[in-house]
Amino acid sequence: MMGMKTYKFRDGVNAVVYREMKNKREFLIMHRIKNWIGWEFPKGGSEPEETHKEALIRELGEECGIPEGSIISIQPTNTSLEFDYPKEMQKRTHYRGASYENFLVQINALAELVLERTAKPEHDAIKWVSCDAASRYLADPKLMKILAASIRLLSRTPHTTKPK
């Protein structure tokens, strides 16, 4: 089709971050305010020449203030998150949408979180919630599937509370 511009998907990572505190697991969610409003997991695009693991560590630091030393484990969930950008964003970014590899990330229960501080923030709130509460906050069915895949992976993973 002449005149039609085809855009590719932006490569990136999505993190289901959890901690174990007093024998219970809590999940990290962030309230997004840029481009749409709602609760989500930390995520972001990969830079050129950056591995998914490197992108994941960078994004967790940028969006949540999680230092690499607070990360206990990173496990791929063997799932992905793919979505289309709104048309005006496609024109501005030259991407059709994003395709993110999903990871399950355990962090030190005592790690301090710091919401990104920029002139145009992506998020205005960050919180720890139970699995049940996460499923109430996450309105996107794709995010619910990612949470379910992470829960299945966790059911095969023993509790490993070990503050650094």
Image: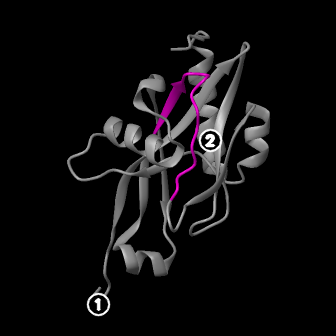
Q: From the image, which quarter does the N terminus lie in? A: bottom left
How is the structure coloured here?
A: one colour
> Residue 36, image x and y in percent?
62, 67
Position of residue 24 relative to residue 94, above or below, is above
Q: Categorize mark 1 by other alpha carbons within 10 Å: few (<14), some (14-19), many (20+).
A: few
Which residue, given by chain and number where applicable, does mark 1 sit on?
A: 3
Picture residue at 32% right of the left edge, 85% below the top: 4
Q: Residue at x 26, y 89 (%)?
A: 2
In the rendered image, the vertical position of residue 111 relative to residue 47, given as above or below: above
Part of the protein shown in magenta? 101-117
* Label number found at residue 43: none
| Residue 146 relative to residue 59: left or right | right
Q: Nearer the viewer, residue 126 or 4?
A: 126
- The residue to which callout 2 is attached is 145
Report whether 19 appears left or right of 80: right
Q: Tag 1 or tag 2, which sits nearer the N-term?
A: 1
Camera sees residue 65: yes
